[in-house]
Amino acid sequence: MDEQDCTQLMRYLRVRMHDVEMGELADHLVAELDRDLGPPSRQLMKMLDALDEELRRQDAGTGSRILARLGEVARTPEGYAPEGLWLDLSPAHRDLFEVDGVDMLDGPSLGEIIEELEALQAQVRDELGGSQWR
Amino acid sequence: VALTLNEARRRIDHVLAGYQRAAGSTGRSVLPASVTSGKTYEAWVLCDVLEHLHRDEGFAITLMESSLVRLKSAPGPINRGYAHFRLTRSGREELEVWTDIEFIALSASYRRVVSGSADRCDFHELDVVVAPAGLDGRPRFEDIRIGVECKNLAYQKDMLRGLLGVRRELSLLREPLATGFSSWPRRTVPAEPPSCLLAYGTDPGILDYAPPGEIFGIDFVYEPLP
């Protein structure tokens, strides 16, 4: 892969993220890249890193790890560990989405595809010359 | 085997198709990413804050008003009926930990603004706040013992500018004063009142912005999601 391939892959990634309703994140990343004077390879790695971050954010496993960590240090007055992790919506959001909140543990299981993406990130880094990207 | 452009595209397709299959049927899918964005990271940082306060500072931590840890999609004043954490330790001021709280700024206080009559310019949001127990409504700048900002995006210069503004609206630059904490987040801070201010980020680039914080008493922490 060379710098031209990186530019093409960034374009492809952005289009495909739109296809899976991650367009908002893709466009945000592209807007931020305007401020980044690095070469396309560095910008591509930033996009892949951000995708990786987004998948981890949504992964149900992350919510479970958060709850387990909280349970190690915090207890209810009755002595129990916290039972769940919940996001309460503001009144405007409640009206718009017709739900009061969401269970933060009710996310998709993305462990396998996070591993796949990690492998791809590592290989792209190797192809482009090492570990200077992080 | 060298990675070709076509092979990289194929693997991206595979990852995103897997995401689409897995994400479609969960409760969280009813909300756009802009609403939930940052909340998982905020919860992860909350874990870090509570762990330090428990292990380094010796506080017992009690989840109050709910058996669930509850985050808010929009910031606001302290609501005492809402879930929060109480910090207790023998001989120490009792504290509470709240998320997504607006505080009354130093500049507003100089103009004698009170919480009920505050305009948008008179208060600012912090993602995690440690303040004395028992407060209600928007805490004042001098009530903030620890304020935390969380960013799960590529760290940019405008985020540093915003953080410097929050620092200015919390305290004046002074010779170091005791924070009341023995080691975490820090023992002293060059600020009066001596509030601690921390910026957590998932982008390692956040540490590039740390030097101004050494002057103004802001700690930058690189903390990726697991």
Image (cartoon, helix red, strand yellow):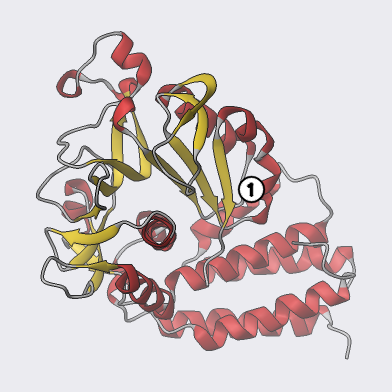
Say which of B82 and B117 sits in front. B82
| Circle count | 1
Please say if A47 is above or below A61. Answer: above
Residue sitting farthest toward the bottom: B1
SS category of the residue bearing label 1:
helix
The N terminus of chain B, quarter of image: bottom right
Q: Position of residue A88 (x, y in %)?
A: 21, 57
Mark 1 belongs to which subunit? Answer: B
Dot 1 alpha-carbon crowd within 10 angstroms: few under 14, some 14 to 19, many 20 or more:
many
The quadrant in which residue B123 appears is top left
The answer, for residue B104, to whether it is visible in the render is no
Q: Which residue is mark 1?
A: B206
Residue drawn 35% across the image and 57% down it: B58
Left or right of A4? Residue A59 is left
The answer, for residue B224, to whether it is visible in the render is yes
Left or right of A120? Residue B45 is left
